[in-house]
Image (cartoon, rainbow, N blue to C red):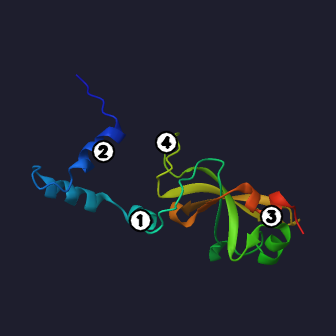
Amino acid sequence: MIMLVDKDILIKVIFKDLFNKNIENVDLIKQILIVNTNTSVIEFMMHIMANPDFELLYPGDYFKTFLPDKYIGQNCEIDHLIDLGLYKDGYVYGKIVKSDDYGDKHEPCFPSMKVELLFHNSEIIMEPQKATMSTHQLIKIDKSEIKYFNHGAD
């Protein structure tokens, strides 16, 4: 007989008493978590702990993030982004596509996201660029906070 267990319920049961010394093998369970939790997950959890106002992101949500150096170039010139209303105070904007996992279902707690960064093309017209970014680097905002959508380009 196959027993199906809901992942969310399983996690709640495991973590509920994780630090209760009366559970058999609690140290082994802790060690399994430590060994199998990668750096990006730890960074994400620490970010959430340090930023209690962090909001989960879902497909279609807009965000701001500091401009990663690797994107500065032909389709990401700061002067053009400013003119288009797509850059402010060191931040660029983007839109969530999906969590960067292999499943079809979006996982808002996944440590990385597939996104569209709102950059420009060679004609200086807004053109999204696909990218993958760490979830903890993305700050959820309302679309109206992006000048390009709110007031248009300068």
Precedes in sequence: disc 4 or disc 1: 1
Numbered disc total: 4
> Regarding mark 1 in the picture, which secondary structure is present there?
helix
Q: Image check: 28 left or right of 125? A: left
Residue at image point 79% right, 59% down? 127
Foreground of the two, 131 or 111: 111
Residue at image point 45% right, 67% down? 47
**Between marks 2 and 4, how big is the CA–CA gap?**
22 Å
Badge number at residue 103: 4
Mark 2, other Cα within 10 Å: few <14 / some 14–19 / many ≥20? few
Judged by depth in the image, the label closer to the viewer, 4 or 1, is: 1
Measuring from the top left, give residue 145's x and y in whole percent: 74, 61
Precedes in sequence: disc 2 or disc 3: 2
Mark 3, other Cα within 10 Å: few <14 / some 14–19 / many ≥20? some
- Residue occupied by mark 3: 147
> Regarding mark 4 in the picture, which secondary structure is present there?
loop
Q: Image check: 74 left or right of 139? A: right
Measuring from the top left, give residue 69's x and y in whole percent: 64, 77
Mark 4, other Cα within 10 Å: few <14 / some 14–19 / many ≥20? few
**Between marks 4 and 1, how big is the CA–CA gap?**
26 Å
